[in-house]
Amino acid sequence: MRGSHDAFRFAPPLVPESAELRWLLERAFAAGPMSTRVVDGQQVVDLAARLGIAPRIGARHRAVALATEIGEAPARALTHAAAAVVAQELRLAAALDELDEAMASLDLAGVLLKGQALIAGGVSATGSRPAGDIDVLVERDVVEPLQQALLARGLVPVGRGYAHQAMPLRHASGGVVEVHRTIPGVRLDPARPRHSATLADVARFGLLAGATAWSTWRPRSALRLPVRDLLVAHALVHVLAQHAFAPGAYPGMLLVGDLLDLGVQREDGAGAVAAIAPWIARAVSFGEASAACALAAALAAADPSLWEEPRSPARLLLDHFVAGRTDPRYAESLKTRFLQRPFSDLPRPLGRLRAAVDVLVPGDDVRPPGSRAWATIAAFARRPALLWRRWRSARAADRALLR
């Protein structure tokens, strides 16, 4: 990352402390005794859903215990959220079996990433960790053969591809597979500081876990899990860089759960990221990564000092995650921040151009899945007024927040 070792890019508005927010954060993350608060059950459910942590609460606590605190209907909503995640895990498991068989038929190696790695490795409890897809990293030259093998098995294209991954493919179960060329933003090779990690890098630096890392499932292919440090690094980059200024697209509070499941609360914030800091330094500063780990530890301990003034970096990050999902003006203001530090392996000018496209160009109505540069140029040409309105709206929100 260019800039200060302790750089901190998040300046959210102060999120007022409320009994509902404190209650759901304790039920989602606290490891010890929890305080009893008088809360509005429906407000708790709505806020938990918006922050993406309703399933974690429903999976961690018995419905009868939740009902005594927030009422039967809100308690059922939280347990149903966890049940929905279990159903999604089953869909992803079916897609994972298909992926494993395709990789075995081609004699391919690979490594699972992100949420599915946490679930398959038994790191995250069943029903607690929402995951929309399966992310698998393979060597760049086998991405296309694997895609073709999956298409031949009945998977269908959805969405669009990116520089770091091929076009997502949906299995008949509903589970989606995303085949990665790189781990974006995680850079392992000091001799290639601009290049995100490949499978060869992961293997060369000894970051593949052993066969005993699997929890209840064993692959037929040479599919592996990453070691804990790589999972932590990828989680930090995914939320604090790739989706740093798009909290509406990906709930930042999922990062807190992942970090706790990976055990960072057993270390101080700086200690938890010391070993991995060089891998993520171009995407996430040491100060930001430490703040994320400190936030996880504070929520696990239900530390009241988190809420004290002046706001600590950990509290600023919490406010960023919450305001990004609950304050439309703040979420709108973040759109222009992509251009300040584009998340890309490209040189800065090209990265900014690509970020401008991602921020401003409308979705599939203008840029259909699989479209290339010509379609983006056509989108600008066809709808300049819409692009200009989007830019002005984001800038206006940004300036209003800075007053």
Image (cartoon, grey):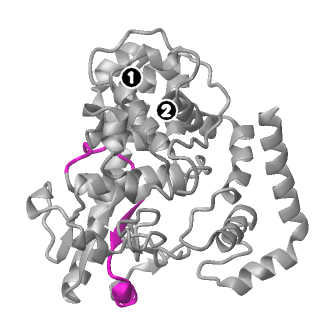
45 inside magenta stretch: no
Residue shown at the point (50%, 59%) measured from the top left = 282
Residue 155 horizontal/vertical position (percent):
39, 79
The residue that disc 2 covers is 48
Label 1 environment density (alpha carbons within 10 Å; few <14, some 14–19, many ≥20): many
Is residue 152 rendered to the left or right of residue 376?
left
Residue shown at the point (57%, 62%) measured from the top left = 343
Looking at the image, can residue 87 be seen? no
Vertical order, 149 against 56 (above or below): below
Looking at the image, can residue 273 be seen? yes
The residue that disc 1 covers is 26
Q: Which mark is residue 391?
A: none
Is residue 15 rendered to the left or right of residue 290?
right
User: Helix, strand, or loop for circle 1?
Assistant: helix
140 inside magenta stretch: yes
User: Helix, strand, or loop for circle 2?
Assistant: helix
Between 232 and 53, the one nearer to me in the picture: 232
Residue shown at the point (85%, 45%) measured from the top left = 396
Gap in Å between the C-alphas at discs 1 and 2? 12 Å
Q: Which quadrant would residue 80 be assigned to in this image?
A: top left
Vertical order, 385 against 247 (above or below): below
Mark 2 residue type? Ala
Q: Where are the magenta residues, as a range?
A: 122-148
Vertical order, 63 against 359 (above or below): above
- Farthest left residue in view: 212
Q: Which quadrant would residue 107 be assigned to in this image?
A: bottom left
The total number of labels drawn is: 2
Nearest to N terminus: mark 1 or mark 2? 1
Residue 38 horizontal/vertical position (percent):
47, 9
Between 40 and 217, the one nearer to me in the picture: 217
